[in-house]
Amino acid sequence: MSIHSPLKPRPAAGFSLVEIMVGMVIGMFGLLIMMQVFSLAEEQKRTTTSGGDAQSTGAIALYGMQREIRQAGYALSDAKMIGCNVLLRTGVTLTAMAPMTINHASIPAGDANTDTLLVAYGNTNGTPQGDGISSYALPADNTIYNMQTASSFSVNDRVIAAPATRLSPCALTLDTVLNIGTGANSQRVSVATGGTGLAAGTLFNLGQSPKIYAYAIRGGDLTQCDYMVNNCSLAANTTDSTIWVQIGGNVASMRAEYGRDTTAPMDGYVDVFDQTAPTTACTFARVSAARIVLVARSAQLERTAVTAAAPAWEGTTVQTVTSPTNPTAYPIVLTGNANWQNFRYKVFQTVVPLRNLAWAGAQTGC
């Protein structure tokens, strides 16, 4: 009978506690590295994306404003009415109507340290110089004019009648053409309101859709108000997004300057950029360009300060031609937002010619 030796115990299979803990530590290090790489990549992506958004927003907003400013003054830049108060409709008067006005007295201010802009122009198919009023067609009715060229008007055209001699103070009315005569009365133009003292005056045709747009930075956005539809002068309307409509989000600042001809007599060339407000027909006629800057802000709030100083533009320092000692400057100031340094900014600036004033050339007597 054989005798078998007892079986030897086999070592247990698997990992020891030490091995498991070492593996977990290595895995945690790997996970931390991957999360750090992901976090850095995501931060770079957000920064790039937000910078791209600011680039697009600023470029599109400035392009839209440029298009409107280039039209400024069409059909309403004549010395007989430029700078006059114009009754747009019952209860709404635009004071000192001009092709372009910076910080117009009737427009409520926007965000701190930003400018407002008011742009006005017509879209007439007739002559922008207006047409002569020969006489009243009916002595007892001051709403029917005998015109030199009545065929240049159409029903529903918006018009402004100005007397032969500029009024002082100058107050005019935006009127509407109701009827054009036919046959023997083909030179007659009938309007809704009319006025006195207009025989030998001028009837200016603004077309059927004149534009008066106000621009302001409100709540960090570029907004626009249509004066032909809403009363942009009411402070109570500034918080109504249906009246002051956002046309560019995350626009932190807008600054503007007039390009003025200061030569005496005027020669039609811009000599200085500043915000000196025109007050007479001649000073309005001397403004033939606008210098505009928009500062677009990234939507991403960074955890640390990424902007050490506010961006600069040509208006930050004094830059004049004929008045180098002029102390006026219009810097970009962003301190209205406590976290302004934690955003990235793009600056968009341009000089826009007011071609309808430039084409008028040097005005006699100015």
Image (cartoon, grey):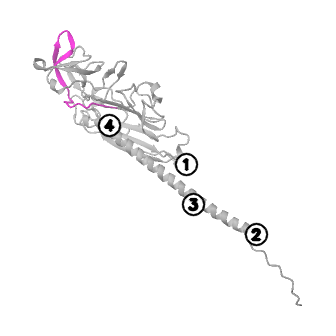
Q: Amino acid at mark 4?
A: Glu
Classified by dominant secondary structure, the portion drawn in magenta counts as strand
Q: Badge 2 is on which residue?
A: 18
Counting residues from the start of the chain, the first of labels 4 and 1 encountered is 4
Counting residues from the start of the chain, the first of labels 2 and 3 encountered is 2
Residue 68, numbered label: 4
Residue 98 part of the magenta-drawn span: no
Q: Badge 3 is on which residue?
A: 37
Q: Amino acid at mark 3?
A: Val
Q: Badge 1 is on which residue?
A: 302
Give me the residue at 22% from left, 25% from top.
204
Secondary-structure class at tag 3? helix
Q: Amino acid at mark 1?
A: Glu
Give me the residue at 26% from left, 37% from top.
355
Secondary-structure class at tag 2? helix
Marks 4/1: CA distance? Answer: 35 Å
